[in-house]
Amino acid sequence: MITPVLLCGGSGTRLWPLSRKSYPKQFAALIGDSTLFQASAARLSGPGFAAPMVLTNSDFRFIVTEQLAEAGIDPAAILIEPDGRNTAPAVLAAALYQEKSDPDGLLLVAPSDHVVPDAPAFRAAVQAGVAAAQNGQLVTFGIRPTYAETGYGYLELADAPGAGAPRPLALTRFVEKPDTARAEALLAAGNYLWNAGIFLFSARAILAAFRAHAPELIAPVQAAVDQGKPDLGFLRLAPEPWAKAADISIDYAVMEKAENLTVVPFAAGWSDLGDWDSVWREAPRDARGVALSGPATALDCDDTLLRSEDDGLELVGLGLKNIIAVAMPDAVLVADISRAQDVKQAVAALQAKPAKQAESFPKDHRPWGWFECLAVGERFQVKRIVVHPGAALSLQSHHHRAEHWIVVQGTAKVTVDDKVTLVTENQSVYVPLGAVHRMENPGKLPMVLIEVQTGSYLGEDDIIRYEDVYARE
Amino acid sequence: MITPVLLCGGSGTRLWPLSRKSYPKQFAALIGDSTLFQASAARLSGPGFAAPMVLTNSDFRFIVTEQLAEAGIDPAAILIEPDGRNTAPAVLAAALYQEKSDPDGLLLVAPSDHVVPDAPAFRAAVQAGVAAAQNGQLVTFGIRPTYAETGYGYLELADAPGAGAPRPLALTRFVEKPDTARAEALLAAGNYLWNAGIFLFSARAILAAFRAHAPELIAPVQAAVDQGKPDLGFLRLAPEPWAKAADISIDYAVMEKAENLTVVPFAAGWSDLGDWDSVWREAPRDARGVALSGPATALDCDDTLLRSEDDGLELVGLGLKNIIAVAMPDAVLVADISRAQDVKQAVAALQAKPAKQAESFPKDHRPWGWFECLAVGERFQVKRIVVHPGAALSLQSHHHRAEHWIVVQGTAKVTVDDKVTLVTENQSVYVPLGAVHRMENPGKLPMVLIEVQTGSYLGEDDIIRYEDVYARE
């Protein structure tokens, strides 16, 4: 059995406005109906695969559980990194965690924000690497390059891989990201593959490699795992030792130095969706190169990506060439496709304004569900609040606002001071200023409630929490 | 005294998504803070000008009164055209209406969707035409062309107008919209001006011209005015005779045939804002030709117009050249600037979908104020409703929905069955399914209310009206 190790703590900005720091691209449905994280988890499930281990950070932990539940996947463990320290400490933590139960168990480490359209072909490639991994090899998966990409590292093989079913080959060395001329030479040579950052090995083999090539990482990461705190189904790695681990990638720390390397070539389609250009390449396109998503209309356009991320938002492109337009109700990006790599400049410009759209979405995900602001006016605000079945908001009060709650779906259990009532569809409750109150969803279906706040100050920080099942302050 | 006659019944689509059939461009703030209609009314006010006469249609009548009130302008009359029949019947109706009180009074007829940055210069040009108009001349205002525009008609003068203050000149003839080569020749010749569709004449003089050149229009339009019905401050022209008037422009019907023509040249800046290209030309631009409006950011763009029409909507352009991007929360247009004339194709494509954004805005204007939908879900809808001071919604009931009302600003007088209550900020009312109810604003300030509807059917047509001060059915 192979345990997938899904890395999903990253928060790229090159796919802004769809990918933002508070809810990055792995959690978005960039290609198809599932999110990239869900598709990654599903791709590494079924016969031969154990339940996955997930490495993420504290901000994303409830998004991870929500998306796994939605996809019907039950994780073996969710490890919370106190802060992002690149892939080497994360992989080491996963291996140390695995070692406790089965040191010879195989781990398949994979990013959770890539797209691999042919999942069965990918699983076949993984199977092709199993014997080598069981023999102590560190197996990587190398993507057959289709153009001279400068954004990836390359893997050098002794010979060009043949056609036919994937089989393990000896890896000569890792090649760092090349410049354009070098990338073209590598592409022409035929014996170079893209390094996709996907690995298969036993916990024992990768731990031996860490001890040999990056021994300074062992102590802090071991301590972070051993002193980690279980919290509502997550394992929070201990922050103090974790902070002492170097911020370094698995490639630099281990792979570029190891000798026991094997590569399985993979040619059935892969993309890291690193920018809007690659999303355009991976999306279904018409004969003129136009890719549409959501309510988008192209009139006389060529080589253009038009994405509307909201059912109620009509996006129309007219006479465009090489343009990317991504429309959301709170932010719109229009860029020349050749500038896809520079979208981070757009994010930086919005951060400088400052505009909240740089990092946040209108929808705010919380442990108990999510809320969004529907309207803000002078002295009032309207929110839609969705509470998961069985979930509860904290017991709280506010100094500056009263709240009207109208349940529009499901049933709420509402506490206002010492009165507890069940409130169902088309019923309302008034929470006076200062009243101690709580909202719970005792039911089996999501509960949706419209909250109308009135008062002189309506900030999220006007809150006194008396009790919180999620241990927030 | 000159009576301005503002024509504002048009509904162009070339400035979609900002201009839509339900709320066209004259009512939008395209350049500056006032709407084009407000700016047009303000431009023709002050010393020498009487209160304006407005010609519009039934759909826009409350927008007209609202925008005039906001601008502090009290109209002399608002004539409602039963349907749009081009400018000749509209001008004739205005002249016949004026004839009743003062046949020698001067009328200044102007579209209300043009932009004239230098209002004092324009008023000086109008004054320069007064003597000629008092002498029975039909005075037009001709714009000094700045490029070879093919979208306008031209006015031919005997000689090129000199520099200096505008003065009345003899007009040789009207020239129809030219092709490109002809437009360039007219521009080079120097004695041609753009026909801006702005006229100054006495009621007596224009009526004489109609009798001479378009006598068939007189009877139906006279009947439409004479049988018109006063309605809440509007004069509704009688639909039956009106329908018999030909759909024809004042230029074709009268001007191209008249002999008593005078033109006053005007060179201080004018645009009909006929498409997004001309909006870009009229807007303040930086050294690279970038014009921004609202929360819009341009990174490395040239000759580009970026407009966000909502404070909460960040629009970012990256590496664009010759692009127009107009973003609204429900619709986004991205077009090559050279295709500005084809925006109507975008509207046609959305009409074909069909998408409501082709013609309507989220904000729905009503006689009593306006409302917008904030959220729609299964079996519920949330609206923001704004009621003008002194205004009242109809007395009504619904078969399929109950309503929760929460007042967030001002005071509402609420009727539910036989109970009438005053409801103020932070108070709520429940209107059960089937209850006969009415909402009024008895105060001096706008009343804002959040309405949460729940029920199996939430369409606007589930309404039984018992009483309506606006005589709707």
Image (spheres, coloured by chain):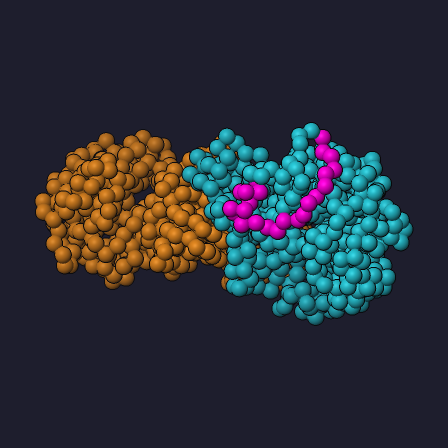
Chain colours: A orange, B cyan
User: Residue drawn 14% across and 56% down?
Assistant: A163
The N terminus of chain B appears in which quarter of the rendering? top right
Q: Tell me, yes or no, if residue A106 can be seen here.
A: yes
Left or right: residue B398 compared with residue A105: right
Name of the residue lying farthest toward the front: B158
Name of the residue lying farthest toward the right: B101
- Residue B26 percent across, percent down from the top left: 67, 48
Left or right: residue B440 compared with residue A210: right
The residues colored magenta run B165-187
Q: Nearer the viewer, residue B397 or A416?
A: B397
- Residue A249 percent across, percent down from the top left: 27, 37
Q: Tell me, yes or no, if residue A141 can be seen here.
A: no
Residue B170 within the segment the image draws in magenta: yes
Q: Nearer the viewer, residue A261 or A287?
A: A287
The image quarter containing residue B186 is top right
User: Residue drawn 78% across and 36% down?
Assistant: B127
- Residue A250 percent across, percent down from the top left: 24, 39
Name of the residue lying farthest toward the left: A158
User: Residue drawn 83% across and 35% down?
Assistant: B47
- Residue A2 percent across, percent down from the top left: 23, 54
Name of the residue lying farthest toward the bottom: B399
Residue A469 within the segment the image draws in magenta: no
The C terminus of chain B appears in which quarter of the rendering? bottom right
Q: Is residue B28 above or below residue B468?
A: above
Q: Is residue B346 above or below residue B397?
A: above
User: Residue drawn 44% across and 35% down?
Assistant: B300
